[in-house]
Amino acid sequence: MSNVRSFTRLTPQEAALHISHGNTVAFSGFANAGAPKAIPRALAARARELHDRGEPFKIRVLTGGSGGADIDEALSRAEAVSWRAAFQSSPTLRSQINRQEVEYVDMHLSHVPTTVSAGFFGKVDVAVVEAVEITPDGRVYLSTSIGASPTFLRCAERVLIEINASHSPRLREMSDVIILSPPPHRNPIPIQGPLTKLGWSYAVVDPRRVMGVVENNEPDDVPPFDQPGAASEQIAEHVVRFLFDEMRVGRIPESFLPLQAGVGNIANGVMAALGRNPYVPPFKMFSLVLQDSEIGLMEEGKITGASATSLTLSPEVLDRVYRHMDFFVPKIVLRPQEIANHPAVVRRLGVIAMNAVLEVDIYGNANSSHVYGTDVMNGVGGSGEFIRNSYISIIMCPSVAKGGRISSIVPMCPHIDSNEHSIQIVVTDQGLADLRGLGPMQRAKAIIENCAHPAYRETLYRYIEESRLGHIRHNLRTCFELHRNLARYGAMLPDLELWDEGEQPKPASR
């Protein structure tokens, strides 16, 4: 922290004065980890003050992944956001996006650094980056996420650094920072395993562009995930049984392959089930984020190493990591998001990808981001690169939601993030459909029979029977009938006898 003296020390309020109406501001952070906290809150307060005086103040907000409440929620409540990319998870901002009050660019997260470097978003006026240290010559040792911060630091015209003393300075020992050269001078990425390191322990910034440093001591605001429910437990058991069978017949080597798991309770349930299974050997992970469940498996010896772009850990678990850095440092590598889910590396390592979605249609197209095909939830995130390029691509969702009012298996997804050509395995609490080598009608029957809730199977089969004959059968008049029913009646099948959450499903009344 002594090197902070080489730069102007600012209060959060003074730092906020360096950001003007209309600026594009890039914040560090990925999946709520490693994001600045004091500066964006001060910026939100300044926006409210200006609005009270009748003066305009809105900025374009750019992050590598979700930045957490101090960025998205605080700024959107202050009505200070005009444009947002490339991922968010804020309830207030989500509502503003869906009301077309904020323009939102939803994109694959590995594309963000290249998009910024190429100038496709225009110039980045200010970068606000959390770090554990900055040196006089411009080495920036980042905190719990690497994300797109190295690119933001390189491209921004002005930079504000938030030094957070709550983080361990030994995070630099996990960091592996590399920025790819622009095409056509981009070389192959020689990552031979999840723990391969290529770069440096720090990002770099021109010290002349650093406007000042704000000191802070707040931990990341990452709430612990809920314990997996019954549906998540059943999904996990189906996935574990499938992976074991794949290993038994030789499609997965006995040494296993690197795993990737998305964010959320379903993924945590799958990881817990893998940890409990004595027949699944210890394995490594090549993923975007590390969560609480993975740290527990690492302590148990089930995970022997992991690569990610952020440590998205609850404060209690992160403190546990900091108190045992001698154990964790050799087992964790933190990379820029451009590398953490780079398609070439995912394919070379043979990653097994496991990601949750909102809904799947009967042919295996998946929607992970938009309700009714119109209202964004969070965004496509980084799952698409893994789904498209993994050795085995598994998507997961409960078969029904809201007490049976919503089926996650539908005739046609009104919005598609990952299509039938990328998805191999579909899993719900009802069962697992292996779609490899199947044509469209075989895929439809496998998904309906194995993954759809019994209360919806008759409707889905009838849809196929009444659809126009073709390579892929669809009825363009009725393909969204379930979604229209949900919007109009509050249930996809209005005459279905519903059940309370947690109860055993009841058969349809017809």
Image (cartoon, rainbow, N blue to C red):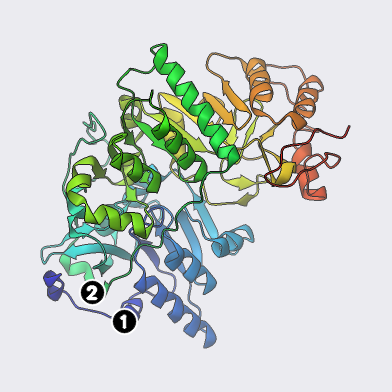
Q: Amino acid at mark 2?
A: Gly
Q: Which residue is under mark 1?
A: 14
- Give the residue drawn at x 40%, y 68%: 23
Picture coordinates of residue 258, whole percent (x, y): 33, 30
**Res. 283 image quadrant:** top left
Residue 170: quadrant of the picture: bottom left
* Residues at marks 2 and 1, CA–CA distance in whole angstroms: 9 Å
The residue where tag 2 is placed is 212
| 469 over 110 or under it: above or below | above
- Asked whether 207 or 254 is in front, the reply is 254
Task: Please give the name of the residue rendered at 41% of the width and 28% of the height, measured from the top-left corner.
Answer: 277
Image point 71% across, 42% down: which residue? 503
Answer with mark 2 or mark 1, whichever residue precedes in sequence: 1
State the count of labels.
2
**Whole-percent x and y of residue 336?**
29, 46
x then y, percent, for residue 256? 33, 23
Is disc 2 placed on a helix, strand or loop? strand
218 vs 351, nearest the viewer:
218
